[in-house]
Image (spheres, rainbow, N blue to C red):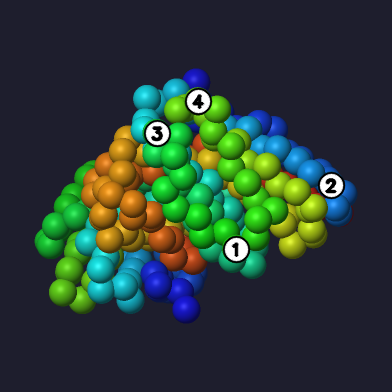
């Protein structure tokens, strides 16, 4: 059984629309993350949360907003979608933060295509 | 500028051969390294981690780390077609808020 559940697996959106990507982890980890991967760029860090608090944000655009309703839950809301947002978005978690506790475990990803 | 550089970009080895992958960080604060493997269409999965100078072996996989040069290498002996994948190197300074930074990866193809 997958321990990090991402929904949906595939998502097609039109330019200008808004979508929410869902992520839940059942590993008992204290930190959660969003990473993005596209053909143009390597796996790229977006956000990190620890105990539901935002720890780091490397996303320049405010169109990307993480939402954490529970410690094991971290959604990603994307507004005013652009074709350049097309990518696979990976949710990840780690046991903690710092040192070896930073080891990441990834979900299966949500493949987003913006037309 | 990419802080984690991987080489080569792609590598073809024969089945049963040895594959050697390299990774160097340009961030002097880095203290921890990981190797992830990503099969086509799948998510990255942690293969090995190394946090101390020296060598670590797990089955067919060996990693080396030289902290002075911030260089790590992954060696796969007796390569199998199932080893064909994108190999990603990740590095982190290790502080409480330190994220993992990934390189662009090395695409390994093992030909039978």
Q: Whole-Å distance between the Cαs marked 4 and 2?
A: 26 Å
Element assignment for label 4: strand
Q: Decide if residue B39 is in sight here.
A: no
Residue B101 picture location, percent across and down: 41, 61
Q: What residue sits right under mark 3 in the picture? A: A51
User: Which residue does the numbered mark 2 point to in the structure image?
Assistant: A17
Q: Which residue is the extreme one toward the top? A: A1
Q: For the residues marked 3 and 4, what is the alpha-carbon distance in whole angstroms? A: 9 Å
Residue at position x 31%, y 59% in the image: B92
Sequence-earlier tag: 1 or 2: 2
Per the rendering, the mark at residue A37 is none
**Which of marks 3 and 1 precedes in the sequence?**
3
Give me the disc on residue A70: 4
Classed neighbour count for the residue bearing mark 1: other residues with Cα under 10 Å, few (<14), some (14–19), many (≥20): few
Cβ–Cβ under 8 Å for marks 1 and 3: no
Crowding near pointer 3: few (<14 within 10 Å), some, many (20+)?
Answer: some
**Lateral position of residue A30 relative to residue A39, left or right:** left
Q: Quadrant of residue A115?
A: bottom right
């Amino acid at each position: 059984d997958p321990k990090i559940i991402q929904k949906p697996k595939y998502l097609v959106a039109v330019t200008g629309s808004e979508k929410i990507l869902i992520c839940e982890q059942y590993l008992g980890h204290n930190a959660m993350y969003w990473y993005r991967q596209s053909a143009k760029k390597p796996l790229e860090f977006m956000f990190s949360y620890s105990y539901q608090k935002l720890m780091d944000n490397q996303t320049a655009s405010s169109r990307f907003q993480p939402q954490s309703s529970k410690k094991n839950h971290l959604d990603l809301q994307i507004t005013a979608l652009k074709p350049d947002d097309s990518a696979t978005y990976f949710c990840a978690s780690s046991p903690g933060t710092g040192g070896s506790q930073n080891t990441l475990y990834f979900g299966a990803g949500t493949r987003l295509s913006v037309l | 500028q990419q802080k984690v550089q991987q080489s080569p970009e792609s590598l073809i080895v024969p089945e049963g051969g040895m594959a050697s992958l390299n990774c160097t960080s340009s961030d002097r604060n880095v203290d921890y390294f990981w190797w992830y493997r990503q099969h086509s269409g799948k998510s990255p999965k942690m293969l090995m981690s190394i946090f101390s100078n020296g060598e670590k072996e797990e089955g067919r996989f060996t990693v080396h780390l030289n902290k002075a040069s911030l260089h790590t290498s992954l060696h796969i002996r007796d390569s199998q077609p199932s080893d064909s994948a994108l190999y990603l190197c990740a590095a982190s300074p290790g502080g409480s808020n330190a994220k993992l930074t990934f390189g662009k990866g090395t695409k390994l193809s093992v030909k039978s």
